[in-house]
Image (tube, rainbow, N blue to C red):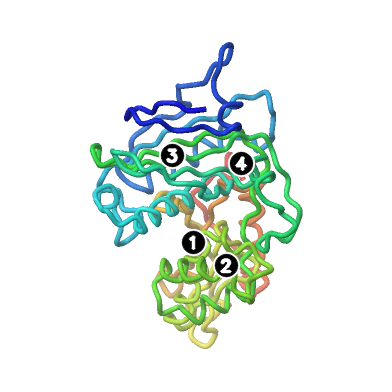
Amino acid sequence: MAFTGTDGKPFKSCNKCRSNRVGKGQTRRIDFDLDKSYESREEFVDDVCSFLEEHDTHIFEASRPSLRIKATLSSSVLLDNDISVGICTQTADRELQKRAARLLRNDIFDCTGYYFHMRRVNERQDGPRFNMTCSSSKDRQFERDVSNARRYTEPKAFFECCGEIHITLSKMQESAIIIYEHNGHTESPKFHVTEEIHNYIKEQKNLPPRQIYWNLIQLADDPRFKKTELHTITRQQVYNVWSAQLLIAEQDGYHLIEELQETGVSLALTTPCFNKYEKYDRGKMTEVFIDSTFGTNKHGYELYCVLVEYDLVSLPLSYLFLDTRRVKENGKRGVRLTRWFAALRDARLNPNVVHTDKDFAGNKL
């Protein structure tokens, strides 16, 4: 069956398109649950994360309407150190544009917990449009035999989620327009950072984390990683491991707390003031202070610190970076704070007095 496009040229449709087209008695939503413009990538990620945390329960209900989000990123938005939206909209380099689309796709994965596969690119007069579908969509199940796919190690659940992302790089508007439509369900399995990945990042620590990330994506079919879902690793996971390695390598006397190294959730460390027993006498550390601050970094981590007054000088003993926004459990913050304090206690920090500027009775731990 032939149809005429907006440019006047004929084109054919497939059976699936004809069966799914909006017909008589059907309505298609044209409004959006969230429709905003953004001047920075961090603002975009934080806003979408907050919105989905409130509206997406990760429980699939076929009768529930899909969530629809429209995000417009201005030309000044930096997608990576060397890539801006403005450059991507004006260039003829299709590989660069595809890279930008993948970066935005991975931001959506970080925000939503759903992984989307690149399906096709539509060449349009105003710029390319990248179309992606949810990896757990029924369409994906029918397209490929999951049992023969090398990157999947366990059977997956599929849903009639109608999950789609459309990313348009508009020349005329010099902006990236992201349309997200999806009926929520259980999250795509997050990549587990294995010992092999830790070792690889450690070997490549002299490279910037974005380069390590892209190298890993290219190694998704490497025999060393064939039993993993390496194609779903996120830049944030690579950065967390890389920054921890850099910290230990460059700062003598800093030590990570093993119990608090949850990728993307927590990172705790002790300082030389805590670890150098010969210089700082633990017996004098009888009075400690706990302080916290928020909104100090672009990734939205909460920052906690344990300090001590030692010979009339305030010394930091330990730091904890914490982000529990995507953790679904009761007492998620309190459990990790308790784990942090217990680790310090087990390392022989036993103060008589603990000061805090918070009223713990009113804290939502």
Of labels 4 and 3, the one closer to you: 3
What amino acid is at disc 1?
Answer: Cys
Disc number for residue 305? 1
What amino acid is at disc 2?
Answer: Ala
Q: Earlier in the sequence, mark 4 or mark 3?
A: 3
Number of other residues with Cα within 10 Å of mark 2, as a class: few under 14, some 14 to 19, many 20 or more? many
**Residue 44 picture location, percent across and down:** 39, 42
Q: Circle 3 is placed at which residue position?
A: 47
Element at label 1: strand
Q: Circle 4 is placed at which residue position?
A: 361
CA gap between label 2 and label 4 equals 48 Å
Q: Can you name the residue that lies furthest to the bottom here?
A: 278
**Residue 255 picture location, percent across and down:** 54, 77
Residue 299 vs residue 213, the one in the foreground: 213
Of labels 2 and 1, the one closer to you: 2
Residue 42 visible in the current orientation: yes
CA gap between label 4 and label 3 equals 29 Å
Q: Quadrant of residue 354?
A: bottom right
Residue 80 vs residue 139, the one in the foreground: 139
Q: Earlier in the sequence, mark 1 or mark 4?
A: 1
Q: Can you name the residue that lies furthest to the top here?
A: 25
Disc number for residue 220? 2
What amino acid is at disc 3?
Answer: Asp
Element at label 2: loop
Of labels 1 and 3, the one closer to you: 3
CA gap between label 2 and label 3 equals 31 Å
What residue is rendered at 71% in x and 54% in y?
Answer: 146
CA gap between label 1 and label 3 equals 27 Å
Q: Earlier in the sequence, mark 1 or mark 3?
A: 3
Query: In the rendered image of this protein, does residue 161 appear above or below residue 292?
Result: above
